[in-house]
Amino acid sequence: MSSMLIHHNEDIFPDSRNFIPERWAEPEKRRHLEKYLVSFTKGSRQCIGIKYVLFLRHQYSSNENSLARSEILLALPKLVRGLDLELFETTREDVTLAHDLFLPFARERRKGVRVLVK
């Protein structure tokens, strides 16, 4: 089951499509919900990059390279945001999730998200 299907399961996260940070405020409720928070999955199928990110965060926390790394992390999104992007022949049906095989997928023979860089 994918994280999208778990995170939008109304039995676990009522009113899941709305931003409700208060649902995490009580420690007992938070402990219950955290086991369903699988953005990067867990266990043997965990995202291999998450350990690398945690390692980098630790490694650069007190290092002079952290300034350069911070500049890269700030500059890259700014560069992408500066591009003039436009959806190209993309409809809601192209991205609506239809089935789940560990990862969510749109219907077969859909184009997915296509972007035109002007």
Image (cartoon, rainbow, N blue to C red):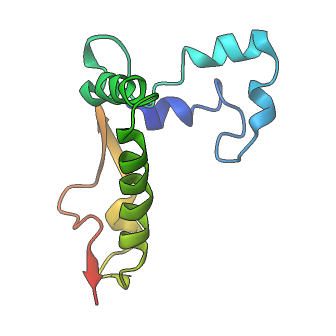
The spot of residue 28 in percent (x, y) is: 77, 9
> Does residue 20 lie above or below 49 as drawn?
below
Which quadrant: the C terminus? bottom left
Which quadrant: the N terminus? top left
Residue at x 37% of width, y 72% of height: 79
Q: Is residue 113 left or right of residue 81?
A: left
Name of the residue lying farthest toward the front: 64
The spot of residue 62 in percent (x, y) is: 45, 28
> Does residue 11 lie above or below 74 as drawn?
above
Viewer-closest of 66 and 37: 66
Q: Is residue 45 left or right of residue 21?
A: left
> Does residue 8 lie above or below 110 as drawn?
above
Q: Say which quarter of the image contains residue 117.
A: bottom left
Residue at x 26% of width, y 73% of height: 114
Viewer-closest of 33 and 58: 58
Residue at x 34% of width, y 27% of height: 50
The spot of residue 29 in percent (x, y) is: 75, 15
Viewer-closest of 40 and 71: 71
Viewer-closest of 115 and 63: 63
Q: Is residue 110 left or right of residue 50?
A: left
Name of the residue lying farthest toward the left: 109
Residue at x 59% of width, y 17% of height: 34
Number of marks in the image? 0
